[in-house]
Image (cartoon, rainbow, N blue to C red):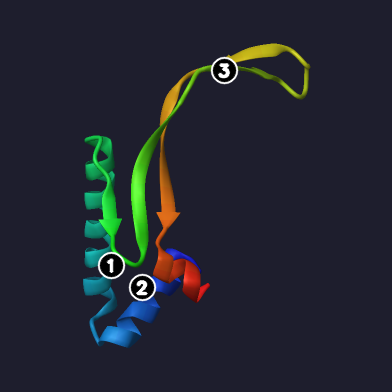
Amino acid sequence: MNKAELISKISEDTELTKTEVNAVLNSFVDTVTKTLKGGDKVTLVGFGTFSVSKRLARNGRNPKTNEMIKIKAKRVAKFKAGKELSARI
């Protein structure tokens, strides 16, 4: 399911217009992004938790040339499904 399909489904279920649903979805994504960027996590009870994880710098290998390369440390977003979501799947 892509974003347009998700917006259509939510619009059908809630009787909101697709424009309204799109605005709400964009606001949700922006809020989660800003919260994660600030170092906090977002927990939706029963659904799951969005958080930030740190990946350490490490050595890798270019598969084309087999040359060693350095991979920089970075922060990555992660999602852990809640009990209810896991049970429904």
Looking at the picture, tell me which residue is in the foreground, 73 or 6.
Answer: 73
Amino acid type indicated by mark 1: Asn
Cα distance between the residues tagged 1 and 2:
6 Å
Q: Identity of the amino acid at label 2?
A: Ile
Q: Position of residue 9 (x, y in %)?
A: 39, 80
Please tell me whether mark 2 sits on a helix, a strand or a loop. helix
Q: Is residue 6 left or right of residue 39?
A: right
Task: Say the numbered circle drawn on residue 7.
Answer: 2
User: Image quarter for residue 51?
Assistant: top left
* Residue 76 in picture, x, y percent from top left: 42, 36
- Upstream in sequence: badge 1 or badge 2: 2
Q: Which residue is mark 1?
A: 22
Mark 3 element type: strand
- Could you tell me if the residues under marks 1 and 2 are in contact, i.e. CB atoms within 8 Å? yes
Q: What residue is drawn where x is 25% and y is 87%?
A: 15
Look at the picture and state if 30 lies above or below 19: above
Amino acid residing under circle 3: Arg
The reply to whether callout 1 and callout 3 are in contact (CB within 8 Å) is no
Circle 3 crowding by C-alpha within 10 Å: few under 14, some 14–19, many from 20: few
Q: Residue at x 28, y 61 (%)?
A: 44
Q: Which one is closest to the eye, mark 3 or mark 2?
A: 3
Viewer-side label of 1, 3: 3
Q: Earlier in the sequence, mark 3 or mark 2?
A: 2
- Tell me which label, 1 or 3, sits earlier in the chain: 1
Please give the residue where the numbered disc 3 appears in the rendered image: 58
State the image coordinates of residue 79 (x, y, percent, origin top left): 42, 51
Q: Quadrant of residue 5?
A: bottom left
Dot 2, how many residues are within 10 Å of its Cα: few (below 14), some (14-19), or many (20+)? Answer: many
